Image (cartoon, helix red, strand yellow):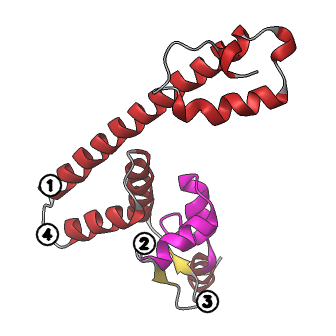
Amino acid sequence: MSERAASSADRFRPNPSRMTVRELARTTGITPDAVRHYVRIGLLRPERDERNGYKLFFERDVIRVRFIRCAQRLGYTLKEIKRILHENEGGRAGHSQVGALLERHISENRKKLAELNALQRRMEKAIARWQSLPEEQRSTRSFFRLIESMEEWDDVSGSSPAERFR
């Protein structure tokens, strides 16, 4: 093959360092729509292929997508992630703000866990009350009354389920 033919063939051979939207999606385990969304909101800034206008991504974008996904699993919103990435690119360390965000998420998670634990206790109380009813009183109607009364459970003491749900 002549030198000219080889360089022409190289020009159209896929470049492993350049990726299209689909290739980036496949490499990072996200959907092409997610890649496009990240581009739209400014989390990714692809270059353009001058021949066809396709968005081109590189290894740095793979690293960036993996960071975005990890940060999302830690509870960061895309808006927060964008701010963190922007501060990092601008040479501002932003470590105190990043830490403050993480501390806020930890606090929010503790609150959510407390709410979920309270819900779990109410559900366990509901099933215990339901199961303590005589079989003939376990109807859809009594179940609805049991569910409706869950708000009052913290205020009511001493009455038996059989007395309350007849």
Residue denoted by label 1: 95
Q: CA distance from mark 1 to mark 4?
A: 11 Å
Identify the disc placed on residue 14: none
User: Eyeballing the image, is 39 above or below 96?
Assistant: below
Which quadrant is home to the N terminus?
Answer: bottom right
Determine the main secondary structure of the stretch shown in magenta: helix
Q: CA distance from mark 2 to mark 1?
A: 21 Å
* Observer-nearest of 155 and 1: 155
Badge 4 vs badge 2, beta-carbon distance below 8 Å: no
Q: Which residues are magenta?
A: 12-41
User: Eyeballing the image, is 150 above or below 11?
Assistant: above
Residue drawn at the location 41% of the way across and 39% of the way down: 112
Residue drawn at the location 41% of the way across and 48% of the way down: 70
Q: CA distance from mark 1 to mark 3?
A: 40 Å
Badge 2 vs badge 1, beta-carbon distance below 8 Å: no
Residue denoted by label 3: 52
Q: Secondary structure at mark 3?
A: loop
Residue denoted by label 2: 44
Amino acid beneath label 3: Asn
Q: CA distance from mark 3 to mark 4?
A: 34 Å
User: Eyeballing the image, is 47 above or below 93?
Assistant: below
Between discs 4 and 2, the one toward the N terminus? 2
Q: CA distance from mark 4 to mark 2?
A: 18 Å
Badge 1 vs badge 3, beta-carbon distance below 8 Å: no
Residue denoted by label 4: 91
Few, some or many residues within 10 Å of mark 3 (<14, 14–19, 20+): few
